[in-house]
Image: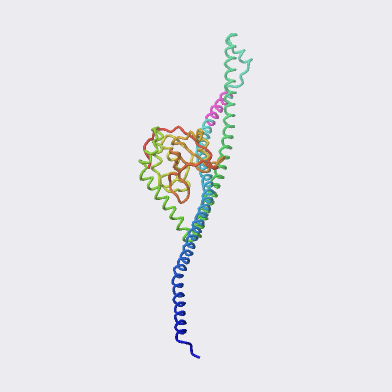
């Protein structure tokens, strides 16, 4: 039985309405699905960036620990080198004194030999022969005093000769001990140098192992810091004016230190071609009449202690309680200049009194002599 024409029309209209509704629903759903997919992609990208940043921060932490250990070894190396230089100077002085003592001993030996020869030729002189040869009692007493004086001088001469021989033996032993210590220090220096080079290689290897994107983040931060330090170096005069240092000598020593902004960190360095932390302070201070050893701990022991609330521009500040491993120079306004560590340059940093802060020291700075650049 065929359906009626009216029913067929209704069925067709209903089917068309359903089809149109379905098409509209699909059209409306597409932007929602697209938006959801975009949000998920955006979230994945943000998570990836956060992950890379976390890896970069972790790497910085590792490098900071490596740098800290390396800095300690470098300062030990500097201390060993300073001791060796002092010992070498003392050895040269001891050898000169030994030459002088030997010459004096030879002269004493000749005098003593000549005196013994004269006594032998004169024969025995005793109190009886003096009495018999005297013309009077006063003459006897005069000759007796003369003989006693000669005997006293002979005894003194013999004692001097004996003492000089003992001094030569003692000094020779001292030179032998110093030479032995010198050889030990030279060996120690060699071991420290190998350890430093090994640690530098470990640092380099760790950087090479890093993911390219993480390394890029690290390099970008290094570039940003270097650009900032370059601006500081270029604006050193303006920065000095901002610090508002009223004391002329203090202003001069800060100005001197600014000459070396941007100089690369070089372990053991103490010249404008490369500086480490104690090398920078030594080099700057030398231009203001203060001779410092090339070692943070030694510099710490030489200065006058300064409480943190009384810090003044030009004071040296130290890190490493008990055995300082890092030194920098305070420039005022909570800032300091330092040669920080490997891969960095002389720069200005902000002071914070953390647990590693060891204290500050002050020295009798003088007006600047000729500038060394």
Residue 35, position as x, y percentages in the image = 45, 66
Q: How is the image coloured?
A: rainbow
Q: Is residue 61 left or right of residue 333?
A: right
Q: Residue at x 57, y 37 (%)?
A: 174
Residue in front for this viewpoint, 15 or 3: 3
Q: Is residue 32 left or right of residue 166?
A: left
Residue 46, position as x, y percentages in the image = 48, 60
| 22 falls in the magenta region | no
Number of numbered discs on residues: 0
Q: Spot the residue most to the right.
A: 128
Q: Spot the residue most to the bottom.
A: 1
Residue in front for this viewpoint, 61 or 153: 61
Residue 172, position as x, y percentages in the image = 57, 37
The chief SS type of the magenta part is helix
The quarter of the image holding the C terminus is: top left
Q: Is residue 337 left or right of residue 189?
A: left
Q: Compared with residue 134, is residue 188 higher up or lower down, i.e. above or below?
A: below
| 111 falls in the magenta region | yes
Q: Residue at x 44, y 55 (%)?
A: 219
The stretch in magenta equals: 105-119
Residue 224, position as x, y percentages in the image = 41, 52
Residue in front for this viewpoint, 143 or 323: 323
Q: Is residue 129 left or right of residue 100?
A: right
Q: Compared with residue 177, is residue 117 higher up or lower down, i.e. above or below?
A: above
Residue in front for this viewpoint, 351 or 88: 351
Q: Compared with residue 266, is residue 168 higher up or lower down, i.e. above or below?
A: above
């Amino acid at each position: 039985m065929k359906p009626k024409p009216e029913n067929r029309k209704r069925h067709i209209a209903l089917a068309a309405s359903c089809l149109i509704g379905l098409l509209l629903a699909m059209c409306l759903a597409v932007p929602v699905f697209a938006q959801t997919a975009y949000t998920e992609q955006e979230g994945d990208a943000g998570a990836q960036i956060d992950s890379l940043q976390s890896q970069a921060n972790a790497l910085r932490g590792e490098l900071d620990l490596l740098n800290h250990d390396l800095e300690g070894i470098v300062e030990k190396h500097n201390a060993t080198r300073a001791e060796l230089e002092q010992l070498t100077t003392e050895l040269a002085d001891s050898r000169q004194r030994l030459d002088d003592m030997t010459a004096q001993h030879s002269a004493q030996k000749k005098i003593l030999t000549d005196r013994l020869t004269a006594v032998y030729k004169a024969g025995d002189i005793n109190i009886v022969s003096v009495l018999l040869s005297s013309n009077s009692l006063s003459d006897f007493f005069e000759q007796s005093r003369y003989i006693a004086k000669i005997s006293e001088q002979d005894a003194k001469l013999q004692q001097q000769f004996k003492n000089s021989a003992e001094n030569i033996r003692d000094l020779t032993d001292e030179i032998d001990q110093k030479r032995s210590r010198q050889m030990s220090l030279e060996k120690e220096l060699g071991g420290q140098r190998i350890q430093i080079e090994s640690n530098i290689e470990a640092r380099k290897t760790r950087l090479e192992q890093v993911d390219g994107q993480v390394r890029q983040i690290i390099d970008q931060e290094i570039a940003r810091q270097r650009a900032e330090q370059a601006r500081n170096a270029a604006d050193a005069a303006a920065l000095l004016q901002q610090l508002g240092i009223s004391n002329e000598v203090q202003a001069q020593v800060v100005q001197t230190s600014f000459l070396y902004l941007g100089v690369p960190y070089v372990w053991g360095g103490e010249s404008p071609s490369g500086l480490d932390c104690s090398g920078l302070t030594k080099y700057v201070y030398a231009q203001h009449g203060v001779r410092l050893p090339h070692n943070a701990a030694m510099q710490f022991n030489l200065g006058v202690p300064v409480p943190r609330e009384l810090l003044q521009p030009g004071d040296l500040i130290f890190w490493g309680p008990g055995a300082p491993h890092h030194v920098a120079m305070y420039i005022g306004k909570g800032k300091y200049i330092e040669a920080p560590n490997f891969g960095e340059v002389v720069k200005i940093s902000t002071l914070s009194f953390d647990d590693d802060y060891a204290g500050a020291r002050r020295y009798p700075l003088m007006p600047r002599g000729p500038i060394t650049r």
